[in-house]
Image: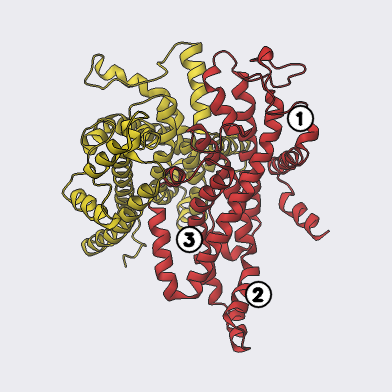
Chain colours: A red, B yellow
Amino acid sequence: MKSIILIQKIFSGRKLASLGFIWLLIITIMALAAPLIAPFDPLEIDPIARLSEPGFPYFFGTDHFGRDSFSRAVFGARMAIIIGMGSVFVALVAGGLVGMLSAYFTRLGNIMMRGVDVLMAFPALLLALVLMTLLERSVTNTILVIGIVYATTTARILFGVTLKLRGEMFVDAAICSGAGHFSILFRHILPNLFSPLLVQASFIFAFAQLQAAALDFLGLGLPPEVPSWGNMLSEERIYITRAPWLLLFPGALIICSVFSMNLVGDALRDNMDPRFKDDISGV
Amino acid sequence: MLIYTVKRLMALVPTLFIASVLIFLFIHLIPGDPAAVLLGDTATPEEIASLMSEMGLNEPLWKQYILWFSNVLKGDLGTSIFFNEPVLSVIADGAETSILLATMTMFWIILLGIPIGILSANKHGTWVDQIASGGAMLFASVPTFWLGLYFILIFSVGFGWLPSSGFPSLSDEGGLSNLRYLILPSLTLAAPNAALIIRLVRASMLDVANEDHVRTARAKGLHPTAVAIKHVFRNALIAVTAAFGFTFAALISEAVVTETVFSLPGVGRLVVQSILRRDYPVIQGVILVIVLLYMVINLLVDLAYARLDPRVSLK
């Protein structure tokens, strides 16, 4: 009940952001119920029907193997959610821990934030490319790599916010009442980091989609047989003149999802704790 | 100012050093043996072993690093395995394309980003603003390569106005008119970045508009346009300048993709192809150069920031 009220508060008077939120719900449902929604097996090859135009029974047409584009797109939603959530998880846990601990234990922090600085000296996609060459193409590795790339920015932001919180009265009170480091960090400081983490999560989710698609396109992302929107674009790019719709649908899905997530992120940021307004930035 | 500059330059050294160690380690952890890749499938194990010792790949890792880095300091980034040419000249070959592409992209970003951002802030809350800032966010959500592919489909294949791929050097036949090869790529690259600048100009102008000196300017009866340009925009420009380092990083990342889409012989495409070819020396060299460039640009941005805004104290 509380969360419904919160959602109402965040989206009241924001038509576009509300639409974005609804779109994300639809994508989530598509991801969860993919086998029920998709009329065909996304991997099933039908050479006779290759490069069919959109219509019936192939809503989005078929690709050059004769696989149903609509079914692949539905399963692609599943990949998008997995990649997004996974990267957000890796980035927030790794980056959050580094940022929080660095701000709390200053001596350790000097060293760790230096490391973050070095990683931030690499442009995002370049870092992802280099890391990806070390690893095999797989879903887990793509998540790890994108997560690490955005862990650096998360660490930077959480470092600033935690530093601010550390100077506040309630932390002093906790220290005076004999709370240990662990308790101060995770019971007193962490709950206050909820809103910056949430805003950060929404933007990382959006960026992760674009990065994953770019990696897929360069042939260094998910394995080629995995039905993801990025792979669909990458595999069918040479057919763009013969079957332009094959790139239209997956592209539109990526754009709508990233756009929606950015809108939701903006709405969240505007509603968040005014203490941290200056520390957080998105697109 | 001078002391600050020197201090900042000194601070670059350890970061660059650690970055070079990281780059070196990354590349040498890559599975797949460059000697085997180079010799192809028909090579015997003996041939591979002898080439490996010739290339110094049998030495301990730290020795390889010291050798590599001391050469780097002398300006020698090694020899490309694929081209059999010095890495520096391989990079230099791609530099013309990449620099021209970046310049042209910056031109579009400034041409589109700043006026639309100002307009959007001035008409804050109206439908003009909603379209401009909504459109900007939409463009920031488009995968670069997708936009590029449709640009090719529409403007090269459909209308036949512009070439779809490649870029002959300006010194080749055609001269300056060869720049037309870069129009579509630079527009593709500019779209998401111009979108960021629009949002940034708008946000910082709205911030500045609430300040006292703007109210004073308005109160003394200055024309609204004069207030917007002379008092608000000039101050908002500071925040925009500060974001150029970030824009540059985004440009590099997206140039990798864009150059691949349009098959441009630039540095970005070189990165991807070298990775796929396992051309270690080139990967190391290019990434080191890009990281150095990025750090220098960030330094220049900070210095410019300090110059533009007297309130920034140089610690």
Give the letter of the chain under mark 1: A
Left or right, residue B154 beside residue B41: right
Q: List the residue tagged with mark 1.
A: A38
Query: Which kind of residue does numbered mark 3 sit on?
Result: Arg
Rate crowding at label 2 as few (under 14), some (14 to 19) or many (20 or more) other CA atoms within 10 Å: few
Which residue is rendered at x = 61% and y = 55% of the image?
Answer: A89
Report the disc number at residue A176. Answer: none
Q: Is residue A203 visible?
A: no
Picture quarter with the C terminus of chain B: bottom left
C-alpha gap between disc 2 and disc 1:
44 Å
Residue positioned most to the right:
A1
C-alpha gap between disc 3 and disc 2:
21 Å
Local secondary structure at mark 1: loop
> Foreground: A266 or A235?
A235
Q: List the residue tagged with mark 2.
A: A187
Q: Are marks 1 and 3 in contact (CB under 8 Å)?
A: no
Q: Earlier in the sequence, mark 3 or mark 2?
A: 3
Please state the horizontal and vertical placement of residue A250, each as a whole percent of the image.
63, 29
Local secondary structure at mark 2: helix
Of marks 2 and 1, the one in the foreground: 1
Give the letter of the chain under mark 3: A
> Foreground: B257 or A48?
A48
Q: List the residue tagged with mark 3.
A: A156
